[in-house]
Image: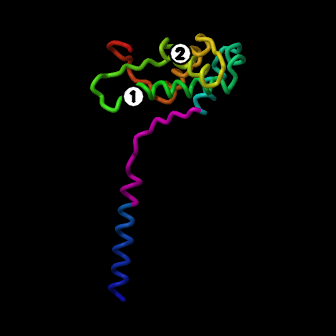
């Protein structure tokens, strides 16, 4: 019986140490990009005419296709660096507008898409997801 009590006490002590170690750690804050959060941030910041033309669904489409566009730039092997540009970047705007037209049959002006992308930059900055300005050649 004494052996069982002693083993139980050791188990409790080890559990307490593990819990204490985990609680003492401070994990770095993770940056989380959320489509819905981005849309909720962007929509009220847009010019009222742009917001009326696009609506919530249009802003969401633009943000979703921007994410898709940026994922397409990712490489499995980082042999050649890819510079990504946040905001009203012509290749991104053209890609997004073409995909929305082709997939959804809706035409958005380049200016409206660019306005959403510019406000997305503000959203990215607000969550700490913007790095330093990139150098080098923009593709």
- Give the label on residue 100, or none: none
Please state the extent of the stretch shown in magenta in the rendering. 19-35
Residue 88 to residue 76: above or below: above
User: What residue appears at the point 63 percent right and 29 percent down from the top-left corner?
Assistant: 40
Query: What residue is at 63 percent from the left and 23 percent from the top?
Result: 59
- Reading the image, the residue beneath label 2 is 93
**The residue tagged with tag 2: helix, strand or loop?**
helix
Q: Where residue 16 sits: x, y (%)?
A: 39, 65
Q: Which residue is mark 1?
A: 74
Is residue 108 located in the magenta-colored stretch of the structure?
no
Q: What is the x, y in percent for residue 9? A: 37, 76
How was this image coloured? rainbow
Q: Mark 1: which secondary structure?
A: loop
Front in this rendered view, residue 101 or 108 = 101
Image check: 51 left or right of 1? Answer: right
Badge 1: how crowded within 10 Å, few (<14), some, or many (20+)? few
Residue appearing at x 40%, y 24% in the figure? 131
């Amino acid at each position: 019986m004494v052996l069982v009590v002693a083993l139980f006490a050791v188990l409790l002590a080890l559990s307490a140490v593990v819990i204490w170690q985990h609680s003492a750690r401070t994990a770095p804050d993770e940056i989380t990009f959320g489509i819905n959060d981005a849309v909720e941030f962007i929509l009220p910041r847009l010019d009222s005419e742009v917001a009326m033309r696009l609506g919530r669904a249009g802003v969401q489409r633009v943000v979703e296709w921007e994410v898709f566009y940026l994922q397409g730039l990712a490489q499995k092997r980082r042999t050649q660096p890819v510079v990504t540009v946040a905001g009203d970047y012509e290749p991104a705007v053209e890609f997004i507008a073409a995909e929305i037209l082709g997939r959804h049959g809706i035409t958005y002006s380049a200016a409206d898409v660019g306005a959403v992308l510019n406000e997305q930059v503000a959203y990215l900055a607000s969550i700490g997801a913007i790095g330093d300005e990139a150098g080098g050649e923009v593709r």
